Amino acid sequence: MKVLAPVPPMGWNSWNSFGWNISEELIKTTADLFVESGLKDAGYEYIVIDDCWSEKKRDADGRLVPDHTKFPNGMKDVADYVHSKGLKFGMYSCAGTHTCAGYPGSFEHEYIDAQTFAEWGVDYLKYDYCYKSIAAEGANLYRRMSMALRSCGRDILFSACNWGSDNVLSWIRSSGAQMFRSTGDIQDKWSSIKNIALSQLNNQPYGGPYCHNDMDMLVVGMHGNSDNAEVVDGDKGGCSDVEYKTHFALWAIMNSPLIIGCDIRRMSDNTKEVLMNKDIIAINQDTECRGPYCIKQWNNPDNVFALIKPLSDGDYAIGMFNLSDNRSEMSLQFYDIGLPATAGRALRLYDCYSHSEDGVYEDRYATYIEPHDCKMFRARVVKL
Ligand code: GLA
């Protein structure tokens, strides 16, 4: 078996923008656009079909059946197409009797379903938590599907999605899963982005190579254009370009998988710039996958903070975030991150948005950050 997910997986998932409204054509077009738009070259690899892809009943042999109208040529055909573009193919099922949208779940069909996914050429399985039997222990159900996948004869990345419940942090790594959802569903709203990010600041020690903390799919570029009423709860939502920039920076430095959720047929130039910022992606994809620690701004500790992440080439990623609604000071004292004034050293900062050197700073870096905005640097310790 190949070792999967040494660093956070990158890809696209149908749920945020399309919900039930998915089809063979949508998935194939998305695969084409992955290549044409540069997403593939930027590192995005998995194209994942979420819920609502199957018929409501299994066949006479107990196998899952793709929806005949949405996927008239079956899933192997879609997988082959995705693979022909040099990409990987993901699908979705659920640990319960039914998926969240009411299609058949894999409960007590784990091995036959893993076999079916392997035969279709699936490379990634997202595994949800709706309609889970109260008689079954959640951790055991994830161990079960993990074992079914690990023994099915194909390398299939296991993306667990139990929304952070049942103390998932304590057992998910040992289940064999490569990533795990740690929160409820994201919405295309600033408040949702902010709440998810804040809720995961203390969970950074739990992710790492081969098992990553998934803060849910990105809403970057959605701009309230979801077809998926379930996700947005009647409110179409939408964020500003600055908010999408900050959302992406938070997910990147907090080592979340980067799974795009917008309609990539409609990406604006700004959306492309955010999603394909190579300096930010490099911070997320760093080999060591060290979760950052947090230094809070003394006069606004709930909303303004820096995240510091050691990188494998000796640099440090430093993200500075203002999640408040007012312009705010952010001052990082270097002694707080391990560099006292007496060290005879300074930090050389490279700006990940202008893609150029910002300067060499001694003792501290102090700045103002606009509401909902951020800065991201790659820092290197230099001798004075
Ligand atoms: C749950 C998951 C979502 C999505 C839907 C599909 O809510 O958390 O990410 O997969 O189910 O019904």
Image (cartoon, helix red, strand yellow):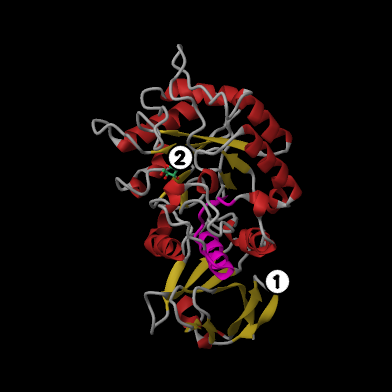
Residue at the spot of label 2: 177
Q: Residue at x 41, y 58 (%)?
A: 205
Q: Position of residue 244 (x, y in %)?
A: 55, 64
* Quarter of the view holding residue 375: bottom right
Q: Position of residue 332 (x, y in %)?
A: 49, 81
Q: Residue at x 43, y 62 (%)?
A: 197
Range shown magenta: 239-262
Single out the residue that lies furthest toward the right. Answer: 36
Residue at the spot of label 1: 355
Closer to the camera in the image, 368 or 270:
270
Element type where label 1 sits in the image: loop
Query: Does residue 152 appear in this view?
Result: no
As shown in the figure, which amino acid type bears the numbered disc 2? Ala
Mark 1 / mark 2, whichever is N-terminal:
2
Kindly report which numbered mark, 1 or 2, lies closer to the viewer in this rendering.
1
Closer to the camera in the image, 225 or 284:
225
Residue 187 lies left or right of residue 378; in this view the side is left
As shown in the figure, which amino acid type bears the numbered disc 1? His
Single out the residue that lies furthest toward the left. Answer: 135
The quadrant the N terminus occupies is top right
Q: Is residue 63 magenta?
A: no
Measured Cα–Cα span from mark 1 to mark 2: 35 Å
- The reply to whether the C-beta atoms of the residues labelled 1 and 2 are less than 8 Å apart is no
Q: Is residue 243 magenta?
A: yes
Locate ligand 1 by image quadrant: top left
